[in-house]
Amino acid sequence: MNPHHHLDPSTLVSYAAGALAVEVAVVAATHLETCPHCRTRVQDAERIGGQLVEHQQPALPATLRQADLRAAMLERLDAPLPPPGAPTPKTAPYGDDDRLPAPLHPYFGASYRALKWRWMAPGVHCIRAADTKTGTLLMLKIGPGRSMPVHSHGGTELTQILRGAYHDALGHFAPGDVADLGSDVEHQPVTVPGAACICVSALDAPLRFPGWLARRLQPLFKL
Amino acid sequence: MPSDLTRRPSPFGTTRPVPTPTPLPRDTHDWTGDMVAVARLRDRASFMRLYDHFMPRLCLYLRGLGNPEVVAEDLAQEALLRLWQRAAMYDPQQGAVSTWLFRIGRNLHIDRVRREPGWVQVLEEAGVANEEELARPFSTAEDYAEHVHLQRRIEELPAVQARLMRMSYFEAKSHQEIADELGMPLGTVKSHLRRAFLRLQGQVRGQS
């Protein structure tokens, strides 16, 4: 898998800074599993973070408290080292056909077959993660050759393609690709014929559908 | 060659000259030697030098993220203790000590404030480069030179870009929060951050 559509640099910066809404971070991490290009760029963003932290000027005089902390640290150096944790087995992403990407496990489980899809609109099924706090995290399954309503987003939409494919004005999106869309983008994804398109999307604000049909669909989406 | 190359010699050999066209930015120091001494020799003096430099900076960072003073101190102590305990895993080719500490501090903070199951696991796994990424052929000296160049680029960022980077890294503000706070359109926030990163990254990755 060699993704052609990547995370926006502004998303990479916020990911590395720990500043993304958790829903968006989960989708970003799902993309990173499959994308060496973006992984390298996250490391760059972390290096920038390290540099920023190192070059702050803590203009604090040494206090008694700091001396205490320093002494406490020296004492802790004598403690025996904790046993090295067993290295987490790195399962090849997507190696097992039924296995969901690891970042999705806490929200959707580990198996595609075990997913409990709910009907949402003709040809569209979804599962919404229950325990997220701020935005929306959902998996979508869109039947082949379907056209989604034209929509834009109040905030950010981040969508990672897991199976199948779709195209829209921005190009062709296949497994491994991520669509990192800002509020200025209005698009109408059309899934390719053949297989259903399965993707995972994070939204940090509600979708906006223009047009009368879309307005009638909006309550169905309950987004 | 400029005369500012007489840095503190590394305990593991002579310092190599770093080709820099203009004087080094303030306070740029190569911690690789101390870190390697901690990793290989469990050298306490080297560790405490790292501690003395990074402890107040990590505290400042963690306080900025909204932690009360005492919590920030606890998290910073924990981060530095992990540096000591896991030093054997340190690979100078993978990045600066500051990058490693930044990652540990950030993860400890996120772990504390967000009770979301996936976050830290996700961050830690994404932070682990695979073998082909580790095989990047940077010598320590080149790495250090990059470090210096990066610092200069940070200092030369346009004011708006620098401000948004700081709000992202030091206050962990989302794009939307930044937009709201500054009364700036969301798209503008993103494009400033995008430009800032690409500007800095050109130096991080050499000529790209």
Image (spheres, helix red, strand yellow):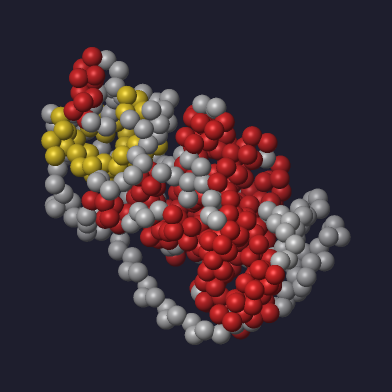
**Please, is residue A132 above or below residue B15 in the view?**
above
Q: Position of residue B192 (x, y in %)?
A: 57, 34
- Estimate the x, y position of residue A4 in percent, counting from the top left: 39, 41
Residue B72 visible in the snapshot:
yes
**Residue visible at 59% across and 82% down in the picture:** A75
Residue positioned 44% across, 58% down in the render: B112
The residue shown at (37%, 55%) is B115
Image point (39%, 40%), residue name:
A5
Number of numbered discs: 0
Left or right of A127 in this view: B26: right
Pinpoint residue A179: horizontal percent, then vertical percent: 37, 37
Tell whether A155 sits left or right of B81. Answer: left
Name above or below for residue A161 compared with residue A145.
Answer: below
- Quarter assignment of residue A60: bottom right
Quadrant of image for the C terminus of chain A = top left
Which of the pair A20/B128 is nearer the observer?
A20
Outermost residue toward the front in this view: A64
A119 w.r.t. A39: above or below: above
Residue extending farthest to the top is: A212
- In the picture, residue B142 is in which quadrant? bottom right
Residue B169, can we see it? no
Whole-percent x, y for residue A190 in the image: 24, 28
